[in-house]
Image (spheres, rainbow, N blue to C red):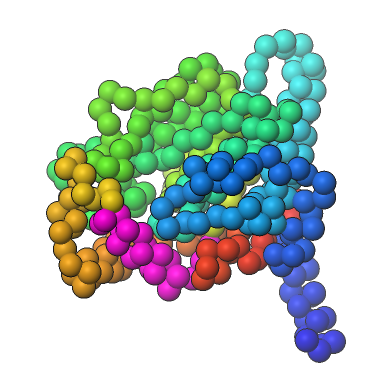
């Protein structure tokens, strides 16, 4: 890089709302943060076709957990100062982290790794994780409304229920229920819920969690409740390849379960299965990415950009 190019790059970064880091620059911010996860832990945390190594945790997620621990501690200190000012003795306001990105980008693995790391910090022993899948409308409703091919699009969620849930969590309410979604049957599980009881941190993972409010609407939106947000980014070519690869692996495993919604794909030959996977990707997931998910990237506190091997190559942190 010439001196002129270096100056142009520095000038561009100065004007950006983000501070950009290479992988090695970000890894150096780990400082002396200890690794508290074992290889066995990582194997349990990763999702299908989303490998994660110890080196990835050390280079990317340990510095991030250190940063978040600092942010949470500062927020907790401010909350306690406000409580003292108001003369209030009880109450607890959870720190909420949103994780967004395309189908197949690895949101679930990122969310689980962060949960495991953050729960090991002394000031945040209680970390909970939910996905917005549980707030999807049931399939019966989606079929009735002609929305099955838009599952995962903003209109396929029960937004009011999700907002009530986040409002209750942020208000410090106890034992707040959240609905459960089954990827096996591809539907919300009737009558089943998980209970979130005043965590130190709540991680909310979902495709469209960073969407802003619609024009003319004065009601809050999901992202309004976040204290910090992460967007996982990758090229559309890599995302399609990862999605197809995951589909092919599931065809040999979960799709063969008699209860699986996708059992009809289990007996397809390789050529037919790949054709179906690419059709689903381009007709539904790519459209959702282009129209709803990708436009929210610039709203994230942190953007993690993956390379073709699923490793994070660049980090962009929003300037305070």
Which quarter of the figure has residue 192?
top left
For the N terminus, give its image quadrant.
bottom right
Q: List x then y, in percent, for residue 102.
A: 44, 58
Does 196 sit left or right of 182 as displayed?
right
Residue 240 inside the magenta-drawn segment? yes
Q: Residue furthest right?
A: 3
The image quadrant that residue 119 belongs to is: top right
Which residue is pictured at 26% across the width and 56% down the height? 252
58 on left or right of 201: right
Residue at the image position 82 percent from the left and 50 percent from the top? 31
Q: Position of residue 141 (x, y in %)?
A: 20, 39
Query: Residue at image x 77%, y 39%?
Result: 70
Please give left or right for residue 70 compared with residue 213 in the image: right
Position of residue 169 measured from the top left corner of the image (x, y, whole percent):
53, 26
Say whether residue 268 is magenta: no
Query: Magenta: predominant secondary structure element?
Result: helix
Q: How many marks?
A: 0
38 over 299 or under it: above or below: above
- 262 vs 112, left or right, is left
Please provide the residue range marked out in magenta: 233-252
Q: Is residue 117 visible?
A: yes
In this orientation, which residue lies closer to the viewer: 86 or 209? 209
Q: In terms of depth relative to the viewer, which is nearer, 29 or 205?
A: 29
Where's residue 6, x and y in %?
A: 80, 81
């Amino acid at each position: 890089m010439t001196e002129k190019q270096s100056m142009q790059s520095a000038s561009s970064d100065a004007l950006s709302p983000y501070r950009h880091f290479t992988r090695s620059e970000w890894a150096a911010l780990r400082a002396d943060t200890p690794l508290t996860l074992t290889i066995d832990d990582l194997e349990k945390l990763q999702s299908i076709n989303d490998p994660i190594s110890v080196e990835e945790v050390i280079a990317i997620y340990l510095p991030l957990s250190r940063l978040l621990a600092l942010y949470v501690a500062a927020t907790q200190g401010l909350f306690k100062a406000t409580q003292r000012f108001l003369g209030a003795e009880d109450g607890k306001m959870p720190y909420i982290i949103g994780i967004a990105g395309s189908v197949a980008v690895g949101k679930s693995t990122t969310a689980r790794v962060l949960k495991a790391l953050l729960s090991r910090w002394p000031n945040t022993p209680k970390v909970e994780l939910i996905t917005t899948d549980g707030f999807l409308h049931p399939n019966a409703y989606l079929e009735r409304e002609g929305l099955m091919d838009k599952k995962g699009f903003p209109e396929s969620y029960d937004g009011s229920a999700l907002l009530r849930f986040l409002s209750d969590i942020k208000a410090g309410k106890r034992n707040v229920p959240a609905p459960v979604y089954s990827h096996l049957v591809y539907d919300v599980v009737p009558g089943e819920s998980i209970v979130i009881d005043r965590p130190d941190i709540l991680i909310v993972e979902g495709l469209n969690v960073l969407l802003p409010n619609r024009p003319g609407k004065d009601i809050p939106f999901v992202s309004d409740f976040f204290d910090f947000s992460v967007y996982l980014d990758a090229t559309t070519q890599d995302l399609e390849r990862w999605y197809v690869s995951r589909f092919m692996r599931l065809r040999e495993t979960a799709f063969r379960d008699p209860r699986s919604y996708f059992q009809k794909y289990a007996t397809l030959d390789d050529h037919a299965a790949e054709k179906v996977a690419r059709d689903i990707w381009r007709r539904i997931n790519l459209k959702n990415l282009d129209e709803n998910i990708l436009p929210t990237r610039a709203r994230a506190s942190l953007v993690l950009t993956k390379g073709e091997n699923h490793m994070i190559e660049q980090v962009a942190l929003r300037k305070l």
